[in-house]
Every structure is written in structure tokens, then in C-alpha cells.
Amino acid sequence: MSIKILNRCVGVVFGIFVVCATKVQAFSLINTNSSSYPSPSIKLFILAGQSNMVGSRSNLNDLPDSWREPQDNVLWYDQNNTWGSLIVPTEPFPFSRVFNGVGFGPEITLGTRIAQELNETVALVKYAKGGTTLAVDWQPGGELYTSMIDRVKGAIAEFPVTSVNVDIAGFFWMQGESDAYNLAMANQYEQNLTNFITQVRQDLQEPNLPFIYGKVFLTGTQETPFGTFRYGDIIRQAQSQVDQQVPGTFAVETIDLSQHPDNIHFDSPGLMALGDRFADEWLSIREPSPLAFLGLSLVIFPFLRPKHQDEA
């Protein structure tokens, strides 16, 4: 059994005892106004990163008709800072760019995949900007990072159903291509990503927030219309290291996903597959059901019983 899998199993067991011992308070908005809603809470997922999270090379013409309909089980915080059913185009935002003018990112499949599996409505909020580095642009405390955190908090504050508890359930990150252009940035990526995750969890008051990220598909010397990216392998290794060393982080492989001919962006099918992979990874780590807890308790609790006098 790998260390990563073992850590995940230990984390699940430990998490069960924590939940049983105390109620963990999530960063959320709870109001007392009465309103009808099918659930007392809703899971909110954050998407952030650079151009491959934006979906810069997406093309609406690639979408089957079924994907052009509103996704009524996915709430989307849109370009006008209002909530509604997710419907394409989801991009661009004022702070992002799509080469075809309008398009979509991995949110197109991510939200509905999770919603269908859970059989409940979910909410998505996104802040991504192309051509940005973790070493400079996404540094905690900087303008881009602060704008992302402010957008998340604003989305929660403006959630339309005031009686619903909004729980931040996962953070999805697709970034690292720009850092692969510079050796110093690439060498600092592991530490920068670790610091970024730590600060996000602190600022959102979610110390155990699942952080799921896509590994860059850049390898060797990548020639693109935007320059030569020589250090993708270093970024990929850094992303693998964070996956192994930082609890609650999960790297998703993307190297086999469909790519645009520019050699640095996913095309539309690649973006849709990325959303599915993000969703599948989150679904694989969600907390165990009460039935799973009951079954596990039969195995664990006998070892926790008080000792009798003759056992001391």
C-alpha cells in the first residue's frame, strides 16, 4: 500500500473520531430568513488557475446540443456576479480571455457530475486568469489572490436562498504552465503551491478543505506560439511532491487529455474530460456515509473499550 493511500485511509478513520467528538464548523453563511429549498445546506466548489482553467481554447461549436441547456442542478456565480443555473457560455469574465470570444472551462462537466452522483444541487464560483504565475501573480496577499478570495466570499454573501448553509466543499486548481517558462519559478513551485494551499485554507477558515489540482501536461521542451516552456517536468514533479506531502491534496493526471494544436492548451473535449476527472477525484475522497461509519465502528471500537481490572 502506498504512503498516499495509507495516509488517506488513516485520515478517514481519524476524521470519523473528530466528527463524533465535536461538530466541525465550516466557513458558511447562515441566515434565519425563511425560504423553501430542498436541502438545509449546499456544497460550494471553487475553481481557480490560469488559461486552462479559464478554458481559453474552448469552442461552443464543439458542444452537443444537450450541453447547451441550463444545468438546473448546478448553480453558477456568473459574469454579472449573480447566481443562476449554469449555462454556456460561462466565459469570459472581465478578468479572463477566450480566444473564440466566448466559451467554457472544466465547470461545464464538473458541477453536474458531482450533482448527479450526490443527487443534490451544487454551486460553483470561479476566478481564473490566463498567463499568470504562482510565483508572482497568485502569491497570497497579492491583487489576484485577494480578488479570488473576495469573489468567493462575495458569492457566499449573495447566495439567493438565505436560509441555506453554504459549505465550501472543494477547491479545484489548474495552473503551472506559466511557471514552467522560468527555471527559478519552476524550482520554487513546490513551496509556492504548499504556501498557497495553506493560505487558502486559512483565509476561508477551512483547514481540511480538499485541494484538487491538475498536473501540467508540459514535458521536455515545449514549443508553443507563446514561447518555449522548458521546465514542465520540474512543475510536474513539484505537483507530485505536494500530492504526497500535503494532507488533503490530490493531483489529477492530464497528460493524455485532448489538446489544442497550440501545444499548451486543452481543446473543448480536453476541458470536458478535465472537469470529469476533477469531479471523480473529489467524489473518491468525500467523507464516508453513516453506514460506513457503523461498519467501521464494529472493527475499531473493541480496541477502545476501558480495560478491566484483570487487564491492567
Image (spheres, rainbow, N blue to C red):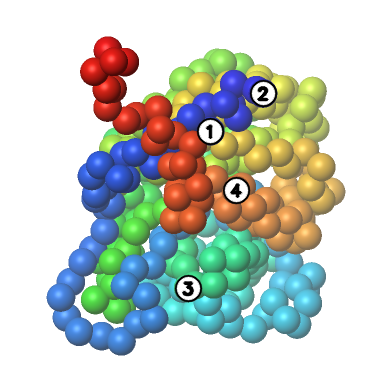
Locate residue 158, reporting x and y percent: 28, 71
Q: Which mark, by number, is residue 93?
A: none
**Comes first in the chain, label 1 or label 2:** 2
Provide the residue designation for mark 3: 121
Kindly report the distance in space between the C-alpha atoms of the residues bearing marks 1 and 2. 10 Å
Say which of 162 and 306 sits in front: 306
- Give the structural element (helix, strand or loop) at label 3: loop
Provide the residue designation for mark 2: 1
Q: Does 91 sit left or right of 61 as displayed?
A: left
Q: Quadrant of residue 141?
A: top left
Q: Residue at x 56, y 16 (%)?
A: 187
Q: Amino acid at mark 3?
A: Thr
Q: Is residue 26 visible?
A: yes
Position of the C terminus by quadrant: top left
Kindly report the distance in space between the C-alpha atoms of the residues bearing marks 2 and 4. 17 Å
Mark 4, other Cα within 10 Å: few <14 / some 14–19 / many ≥20: few
Locate residue 157, reporting x and y percent: 25, 66
Q: Are marks 3 and 4 in contact (CB under 8 Å)?
A: no
Kindly report the distance in space between the C-alpha atoms of the residues bearing marks 3 and 1. 28 Å
**Comes first in the chain, label 2 or label 4:** 2
Provide the residue designation for mark 1: 9
Frontmost of labels 2 and 4 is: 2
Kindly report the distance in space between the C-alpha atoms of the residues bearing marks 1 and 4. 12 Å
